[in-house]
């Protein structure tokens, strides 16, 4: 049985080695496809075609996976201009496979869902985010005009879908309910956690600086960089000069540095840039933080917060998407509320070592629920049921 995976993700073909690469973020790597290859004999990946190699080359090509990339699918004007042609391409792909995995929100995914219904092709929807907050915070008047329309479209698609996987436990289910069969499975890929000895060693040691970390692309302005910088300024005004913020992410970070200079906190900011996934990059970065901060204005269920929990980090997050499902409500601020974020940072700063260790232990226990072995077993059962 062959399946198609359809989403508005960017991929690029490298003529030098004949491979396809994740064009943004790095989450669409070989490991992602192996999840589905546990159920299907082969996968056709449908995404948006990029012509320029990203600065972070994350391999996406692997055995039994083919790519059918859609050109002219970037931006509203391009989509409208090429809509008829793109739908023809999607229909040819959908009708050539036995099953379709559609990740929403995405324009290609929304069109594919209608094509599946029309041609009676079996499919599953993966709900990984909220288009209302995503479009609203994307910037500009057009985004705010489009946001409620996109949310309405997605509600209709999800409501009638035969099978739906949500990355949250409750949040996205409430916003985009389905009247048929559903399952809650995060798309995080967590293979292990740190142990108790490592946890105790970190939290009982003396440290010269109080280090905060954020992971989020610089391509967009809704990852909460501005809110964190404003919170940092407030803390500086209160005399907290030994707080350092380290930022990991792809894209041009100049606008963040300019913003920090404007608020007079650029000396407390450190741009790390792009790092590799897992034990070769993200985990070592998380392991040296006192606090991981995730002040994003829009989310589904952020993988990086779960990864931070798995490293025993204290996490401060916004309430965007299902983020508030992962940490104690006392450490959750309303998206955009930088004053509450500053209060939460100060609260952790003032805590003694034993109290920090207690929170870290609780966070580690939450992470255990998201181990890949547990989630993959449920995913395979659900996909087998949906495709049978």
Image (spheres, grey):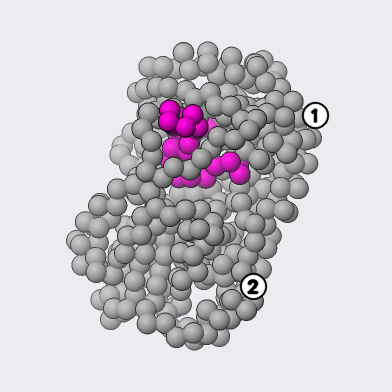
Residue drawn at (67%, 48%) of the image: 185
Q: Which residue is mark 1?
A: 388
Residue sitting nearer the eye, 120 or 196: 196
Residue 238 within the magenta-colored segment of the rendering: no
The span from disc 1 to disc 2 (Cα, nearest Å) is 40 Å
Image height check: is 84 above or below 260? above
Q: Which residues are magenta?
A: 7-32
Which residue: 55% across, 53% down?
303
Q: Could you tell me residue 347's position as x and y percent?
A: 44, 78
Position of 83 with respect to 358 (left or right) is: left
Q: Earlier in the sequence, mark 1 or mark 2?
A: 2
Report the residue at 65% width, 16% height from top.
95
Left or right, 91 with respect to 78, comes to right
Q: Position of residue 73 (x, y in %)?
A: 42, 25
Residue at figure coordinates x 58%, y 41% from the top left: 30
Q: Which residue is mark 2?
A: 195
């Amino acid at each position: 049985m062959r399946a198609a995976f359809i989403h508005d993700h960017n991929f690029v073909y490298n003529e030098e080695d004949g491979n396809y690469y994740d064009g943004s973020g790095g989450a669409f790597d070989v490991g992602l496809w192996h999840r589905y290859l546990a159920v299907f004999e082969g996968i056709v990946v449908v995404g948006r075609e990029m012509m320029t190699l990203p600065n972070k080359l994350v391999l996406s090509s692997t055995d039994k996976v083919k790519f059918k990339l859609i050109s002219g699918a970037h931006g509203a004007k391009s989509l409208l201009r090429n809509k008829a042609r793109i739908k023809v391409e999607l229909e040819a792909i959908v009708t050539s496979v036995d099953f379709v995995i559609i990740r929403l929100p995405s324009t290609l995914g929304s069109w594919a869902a209608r094509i599946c219904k029309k041609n009676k092709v079996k499919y599953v929807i993966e709900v990984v985010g909220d288009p209302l907050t995503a479009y609203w915070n994307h910037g500009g008047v057009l985004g705010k005009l489009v946001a409620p329309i996109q949310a309405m479209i997605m509600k209709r698609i999800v409501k009638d879908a035969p099978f739906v996987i949500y990355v949250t436990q409750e949040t996205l289910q409430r916003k985009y309910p389905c009247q048929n069969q559903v399952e809650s499975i995060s798309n995080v890929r967590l293979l292990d956690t740190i142990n108790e000895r490592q946890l105790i060693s970190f939290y009982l040691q003396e440290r010269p600086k109080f280090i905060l970390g954020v992971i989020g692309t610089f391509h967009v302005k809704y990852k909460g960089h501005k809110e964190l910088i404003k919170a940092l300024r407030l803390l500086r005004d209160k005399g907290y000069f030994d707080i350092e913020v380290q930022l990991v992410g792809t894209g041009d970070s100049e606008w963040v540095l300019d913003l920090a200079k404007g608020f007079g906190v650029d000396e407390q900011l450190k741009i790390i840039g792009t790092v590799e996934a897992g034990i070769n990059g993200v985990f070592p970065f998380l392991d040296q933080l006192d606090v991981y901060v995730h002040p994003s204005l829009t989310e589904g269920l952020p993988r990086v917060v779960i990864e931070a929990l798995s490293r025993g980090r204290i996490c401060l997050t916004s309430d965007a998407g299902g983020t508030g499902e992962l940490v104690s409500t006392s450490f959750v601020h309303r998206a955009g509320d930088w004053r509450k974020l500053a209060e939460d940072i100060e609260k952790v700063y003032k805590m003694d070592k034993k109290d920090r260790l207690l929170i870290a232990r609780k966070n580690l226990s939450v992470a255990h629920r998201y181990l890949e072995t547990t989630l993959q077993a449920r995913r395979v059962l659900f996909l087998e049921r949906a495709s049978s």
